[in-house]
Image (spheres, rainbow, N blue to C red):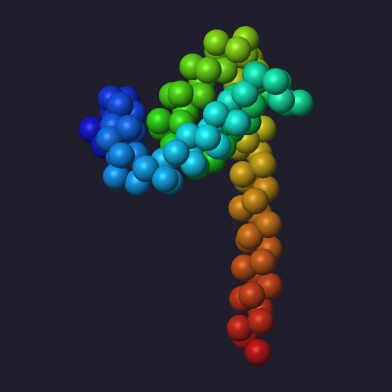
Amino acid sequence: MYTDPDDLKRARSVGANAPAEFAAWRAFQEAVDREDGAVPRRYRELISVAVALVTQCAYCLDVHTAAARRHGVTAEELAETAFVTAAVRAGGTLAHALMADRLYEGHGH
């Protein structure tokens, strides 16, 4: 299997090979995961789930759906987040299709 939840345990060993970068990443992650931000933690987790869906990161999806549940996100909120994410991603595809159409026309001259 290409993705394995146990791979997450390897983060520290991978980080040991790039300690400065790993420390910076961890500090950034800790800032994002803080409880006292203007954006409540449950919303931060829904945002994280949405990004994980778009980037198709199975590990992020695992970590952030678990955190979302711990922070009171309901199954209905998770489902709505998935569909909002799908609609916005589809909108991005359409936006690029419009650009492709313009570029295609430009290449004909």
- Residue 53 screen position, x and y as percent: 52, 35
Q: Is residue 20 left or right of residue 6?
A: right
- Residue 27 screen position, x and y as percent: 52, 35
Question: Farthest front residue?
Answer: 20
- Residue 95 screen position, x and y as percent: 68, 57
Q: Nearer the viewer, residue 62 or 109?
A: 62
Q: Is residue 29 left or right of residue 59?
A: right
Asked whether residue 95 is in view, the answer is yes
- Residue 69 screen position, x and y as percent: 55, 12
Determine the residue positioned at 61% across, 44% down: 89
Residue 48 vs 106, above or below: the answer is: above
**Split into 4 quadrants, where in the image is the C terminus?**
bottom right
Q: Nearer the viewer, residue 57 or 13?
A: 13
Q: Nearer the viewer, residue 12 or 39?
A: 12
Residue 51 vs 5, above or below: the answer is: below
Q: Nearer the viewer, residue 69 or 100?
A: 69
The answer to which image quadrant residue 81 occupies is top right
